[in-house]
Image: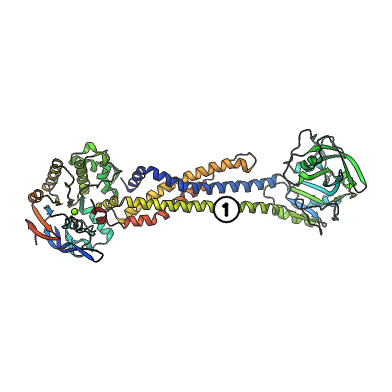
Amino acid sequence: MKLKEIAFNNLKRRKSKMVFLILSIMIGVATIITILNTTEQAQMDIETKLDEFGANIMIVPKSNTLSMSYGGISIPGAQYDVREISESELKNIWTINDNQNLSIVSAKLLGAVDIESESAMMIGANLATEIRLKKWWQFQEGSEIEMVRSEEPSPIDPTRMMTVTAIKDFKPTDIILGSRVAAKFNKNPGSTVNLKYNNTKGNYYVRGVLEETGSQDDSVIFMDLATAQGMLNKDAKITLVEVAALCAGCPVEEMARQINAALPNGQATPIKQVVASKMQTIGQLKNFGLLLGAIILVIGSFIVFTTMMGSVNERTREIGIFRAIGFRRSHIMKIIFLEAAVVCLVAGLSGFILGTLASFGLSGWISESRFTLMVNPLYAGASMVFAVILGILASIYPAKKAADIDPTEALRHI
Amino acid sequence: MIKFDSVCKYYVSGSETVKAVDNISFCLEEGGYLAISGPSGSGKSTVLSMLGVLNRPTRGKVFIDDIDVYNLVSEQRADFRSDYIGFVFQAFQMIPYLTALENVMLPLAITEAKNKEQTERALEMLEKVGLSHKADKLPNQLSGGEIQRVAIARALINQPPVLLADEPTGNLDSKNADSVMQLLKELNQSGQTVIIVTHEKNIAANARAHIELFDGKIVESRKGVLK
Ligand SMILES: Nc1ncnc2c1ncn2[C@@H]1O[C@H](COP(=O)(O)OP(=O)(O)O)[C@@H](O)[C@H]1O
Ligand SMILES: [Mg+2]
């Protein structure tokens, strides 16, 4: 028999107390693990979304006096006078150094049009490109959107072929409606819409209606770029270019810089800045969660402290016997520390497991029903080490108290 | 040899000073059998705990094998207890969550002895006190007499030169008390130094050496005891 067996046997005797102790530390550890896993997952999710879906660089015309806010740009009513980039300049984007990282370049013309005598935002773009860029777009039932691919000579190097995606049988007067516009004017796929800009007006066919995206796209009328340019009288003009870089962790800032050099009239901004604020929110959530976990752990260590203290008081006589038998003060302390360490080791491990399971449960909620089990071995180790350190710190005073018990006093009252 | 040299132990509580042990001197040869008797509160347990290197005297010196034991630092005194002293108390001296065997092994838990050796030695000791068949019982499954025997086995497992027993039969019926006293006597006959505290006159009378205390002073002593 060694001291550790003495400690184990004592723990076995006090099962319910030990379970309570384990729970109190376990919950704190589990909270922290859950927060760490969940926020990490949310951050990763945003990053992949950013990389896989949608734009990472926005290009807007330089020197603009208007406030912007469509993911950067807002067009206040009809009265706008935005300087435009000319379409011919756009080819230069493909000439930047890091052009192998360019995936999608979606040029747009923004404007306000009247739909049934109310003003609405219209975006002219190559809609097939737009659909590729916004992979999260989904169409309501009845929409006739079928993508077809074909090989065509590259615009930069006509000797090379490139894959071009298009919407099957798409006509210049076909449009796509955001879900809110469609609902407001009671339009469905197949409806006809009358649009008016100054004196130009015409009927347009609703090829598709978007499912709600939760973004500004919900309030937008999407139209073919050339049609929009004709309607708004802005031939070959562009107000906004969204660029998707191809890879995770592309040098987006550097690419934006290169685009700025290539486009004298354009102002390229990496969208990471937009995401930065989202990341910041997650960061705040994380801090709050960690603080909560820390508070639970402080309470947990207080419970360790009081339980160990109570245990020492209950065991005064026992400790007197240990001392009479020849145990050193340090042996007594070792027994107390071993008990705390074992309990907290179990608590740390079970807290890690609980936290991992909890974050698994939450993961489906974080990233649209994709459940991911994140088992971080580093966290497993850290949970146990941290819990044990906590337990030992909380037991220093009780252990010292135990070692200081005067054996004669302890053994006096028989 | 054990030597008490003008030993006093005073307890101060508030303005009151209790002279639990008041200037006691005596010697006991190795292999001796000393009974300490006296009424309750006369200082018997205090003397025994000072002999057991658990309780520092207010004044005077305690020598065991010519070692001035209270000159040792705390950890050395613990080691000294481990090596030299075996304790048997009146009651409640078992660790409740350890079996009889484990209780007997307890003093070895802080030694280098391997588990196998510990078990062997503990079983041997239980055999000696006639309880090897109760090795796996917890203390609450043992009778008072059995517990005292286990306590004796535990006290002797490290083969300490000195066995101290504080009213070891105080909680036992006369039959069990007799057998425990018989065991101690046999141990002494095989060379073990035994010091026993008792308030039973006949036990004291049968011991080879005897000190009677009253109010912390020796009022009577006999055989092998030096003043
Ligand atoms: N730790 C202590 N603090 C205060 N008084 C004590 C302490 N230990 C013993 N005493 C007192 O010392 C006297 C002797 O006690 P003790 O040695 O236990 O006597 P006995 O064992 O003969 O009954 C008693 O009056 C007791 O109350
Ligand atoms: Mg007493």
Residue A44, placed above or below residue B212: above
Q: Residue furthest left?
A: B223
Colour scheme in the image?
rainbow
Q: Which residue is mark 1?
A: A288
Q: Amino acid at mark 1?
A: Phe
Residue B131 spot, x, y in % from top left:
20, 39
Count of labels in the image: 1
Residue B214 spot, x, y in % from top left:
12, 59
Q: Is residue A335 visible?
A: no
In the image shown, does A16 or A1 lie closer to the viewer? A16
Q: Secondary structure at mark 1?
A: helix
For ligand 1, the image quadrant comes to bottom left
Residue A202, placed above or below residue A313: above
The quarter of the image holding the N terminus of chain A is top left
Q: Is residue A183 visible?
A: yes
Q: Residue furthest top?
A: A142
**Cβ(mark 1) to ligand 1 < 8 Å?**
no
Residue A316 spot, x, y in % from top left:
30, 52
In the image shown, does B44 or A148 lie closer to the viewer? B44
Image quarter of residue B52: bottom left
Q: Residue furthest front?
A: B15
Few, some or many residues within 10 Å of mark 1 (<14, 14–19, 20+): few
Q: Classify residue A400 as left or right of residue B51.
A: right
Residue B116 spot, x, y in % from top left:
28, 42
Q: Classify residue A151 as left or right of residue B46.
A: right
**What chain letter is assigned to the residue under label 1?**
A
Q: Classify residue A190 as left or right of residue A279.
A: right
